[in-house]
Amino acid sequence: MVNKNKEVDVSIILTEIEKEVSGIIVGQKEIIHGILRGVLCNGHVLVEGVPGTAKTLIVKSMATVLGCDMKRIQFTVDLLPTDITGIMSYSPEKGFKVEKGPIFTNFVLADEINRSPPKTQSALLEAMQEKSVTIASDTYDLPKPFFVMATENPLENSGVYTLPEAQVDRFLFKLLIGYPSAKEEQGVLKKNTTTSTFESYDLKAVLNPKKIVELQEKVKEVFTSEIIEEYIIRIVGESRNKDWEMGKYISYGGSPRASIALYIASKAEALMHGRDYVIPEDVREVAYPVLRHRIILNYEAEAEGITTDKVIKQILSKVSVP
């Protein structure tokens, strides 16, 4: 198990990070918590939300507070894979030279990833999985930590390319970012970066890349009992079950990768709450972001307004808590 003294320090650090980010971001606590959890899990996050909900600002703020470099890639229909990974260039004066792309950074914001064709999407997703990039005939490791937050706009249905389910599965979490409350939106008016610059908020770095990697290792040390492991397996197994009320709406359930994601995510959730062991509530908390993009619903579900979150809610109520 994690040493108790060090565990408390981790909890304090994470509280400091969330407090620092809240200096510029109004509301969106669940999104900030989810992104931070993704970083601790050494996983990537897919965020779905309408324009203007501070997705870019959240990632920029998180990168600053975590003491990491950040680059933004705007996905468009004419974006090429080499625009992301880099190319081998040649000049008569210097000869051949590797020009590394924007993916060589700690935090990548892949904005509106579904606006680019599958070939370009795959270049990013391959780098996410392998944590390395091949340019010409040489392979280059990406910096540590390496984190991708990709966004997609749910409003657009023309000029976009749906992410294949097998590629979406590469994202550890799918987070849904909604509109702020009336009170929060009033706070946005005072803190918006149109009337104030990002630099004027003077965000302080709480961590650095080396410390983040150490925290990622600490997540792996969090204890998970066999009972909790069985609970995870039963939840994912129920997502594949067709013989129950919601089963008729499910085309495909979660794969073993979903079980692995629940396993590591629940460890991170426990650590973020100052514990060195996982409890059922940790698993239930991360079930939605882990499973909502891994459970594939059929047309009948769409016709009846059944969402994956509704299915997940029913699964959690159906599976007995240990």
Image (cartoon, rainbow, N blue to C red):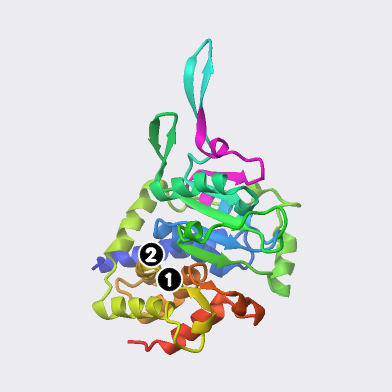
Q: Which amino acid type corresponds to the residue marked 1 in the rendered image?
A: Gly
Residue drawn at the location 63% of the way across and 46% of the way down: 75
What secondary structure is marked by label 2?
Answer: helix
Tell whether label 2 touches label 1 (CB within 8 Å): yes
Residue 190 percent across, percent down from the top left: 73, 61
Residue 310 percent across, percent down from the top left: 55, 81
Q: Which amino acid type corresponds to the residue marked 2 in the rendered image?
A: Arg
Residue 87 percent across, percent down from the top left: 51, 29
Crowd rating for badge 1 (residues with CA inside 10 Å; few <14, some 14–19, many 20+): many
Q: Was residue 70 drawn as part of the magenta stretch in this picture?
A: yes
Quadrant of the frame with the N terminus: bottom left
Label number found at residue 257: 2
Crowd rating for badge 2 (residues with CA inside 10 Å; few <14, some 14–19, many 20+): some
Res. 133 in view: yes
Is residue 240 positioned above or below 162 on the image?
below
Quadrant of the frame with the C terminus: bottom left
Label 1, label 2: how far apart the Cα atoms are: 7 Å
User: Residue most toward the top?
Assistant: 93
What secondary structure is marked by label 1?
Answer: loop
- Magenta segment range? 63-87
Foreground residue among 104 and 116: 116
Residue 40 percent across, percent down from the top left: 40, 59
Foreground residue among 21 and 56: 56
Label number found at residue 254: 1
